[in-house]
Each structure stands twice: as structure tokens, then as C-alpha cells.
Image (cartoon, rainbow, N blue to C red):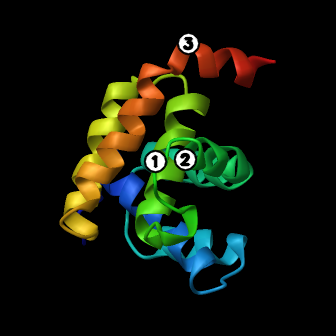
Amino acid sequence: MPKAKHTRRSARETVLQALYAVEVGQEHEAKALKDILGREKRDEEINEFIVELFEISLKNRDWCENEIKSRLNNWEFERVAVLDRLLLILAISEIFFIDNIPPKVSIAEAIEIAKQFSTEESSAFVNGVLDNIYKSLPKVNEVVSS
């Protein structure tokens, strides 16, 4: 019997895969989530985290993309690699809409996932955008609450 995956990092990677299936594969959201959940055995708590993060990322996608766009200096949003954009949406959603995870953990996890799945420059790019967002947290949180 395969060992269940327990880590939140594996959950974040799973959410990234589901978001990618929706974005690039034009997969229906519910089907992408069902397929991704069915691929591996996980603890129920991790599955719940996957569902929550996936749904929050989709629900807040436009807001997250605006946060990204407002922090791109001399760079067009359309030129951001799809994987990096989706990873940023996931991390920003986690930072702002999941209360029990410290923002620095979300940022560190996104950087590590970028190192593993994206280009050599991606981790520095993801770090730069998320660090900028982190530094503006009190100001942005006021806007989100309004």
C-alpha cells in the first residue's frame, strides 16, 4: 500500500498542478481538482488544505493578478511565465486568505517550489514579488478588509 503524502509542500505542488491544468489544459476546475486529488493517497487534513487553497486561489485570482501587476517594474504581466504566475497566485492567496499560515512560510514555500519546477531565475523573481507584497502587508490588508 502506498504511503500517504503528509506535507503541506506536496499539497501546494498539487494545487499548482491543478491550477496549471485549468490554465494550460483548459480543464474544468472541478475535474482538475478531482483528478489531482485522485492521483495520490494523502491524509484527509492535507486533502482539505488542497481543496481550500485551490478554491481560494481561483476565487481571488483577479485580485492576486492585480497585486502582481502592481509590482512588476519594467516588465509586462503577459511575459511572466505561466508557472511563475500561478505560483504567485497560490502564494498570495495563501498569505491573504488562509489565516493559520505565517506569510514568511508561504513565501519560503513558493521560493522552494519555484526552484524545483520553474526556471533558474524564477525563485529570485517569485521572492522579489512576494517580498514586496510582504513589506506592504498592513496597507494591503486594509484594502482587502474594506
**Left or right of residue 19, residue 40 in this image:** left
The amino acid beneath tag 2 is Ile
Residue 92, above or below 142:
below
Residue nearer the viewer, 110 or 34? 110
- The amino acid marked with disc number 1 is Asn
The answer to whether the residues at label 2 and label 3 have Cβ atoms under 8 Å apart is no
Q: Secondary structure at mark 2?
A: helix
Instruction: Check residue 73 in the rendering and tell me which mark sits there, or answer none.
Output: 1
Q: CA distance from mark 2 to mark 3?
A: 17 Å
- Number of other residues with Cα within 10 Å of mark 1, as a class: few under 14, some 14 to 19, many 20 or more: few
N-terminal of the two: label 2 or label 1?
A: 2
Q: Which residue bears the numbered disc 2?
A: 68
Q: Position of residue 129 (x, y in %)?
A: 41, 42
Secondary structure beneath label 3 = helix
User: Marks 2 and 1, how far apart in space?
Assistant: 10 Å
Q: Quadrant of the C terminus?
A: top right
Sequence-first disc among 1 and 3: 1
- Residue 46: give x, y in percent of width and height: 43, 47
Left or right position of 132 against 67: left
Give 100 or 143, whichever is nearer the viewer.
143
* On-image quarter of the N terminus: bottom left
The residue drawn where x is 33% and y is 41% is 128
Question: Do the CB atoms of the residues marked 1 and 3 lie less than 8 Å apart?
Answer: no
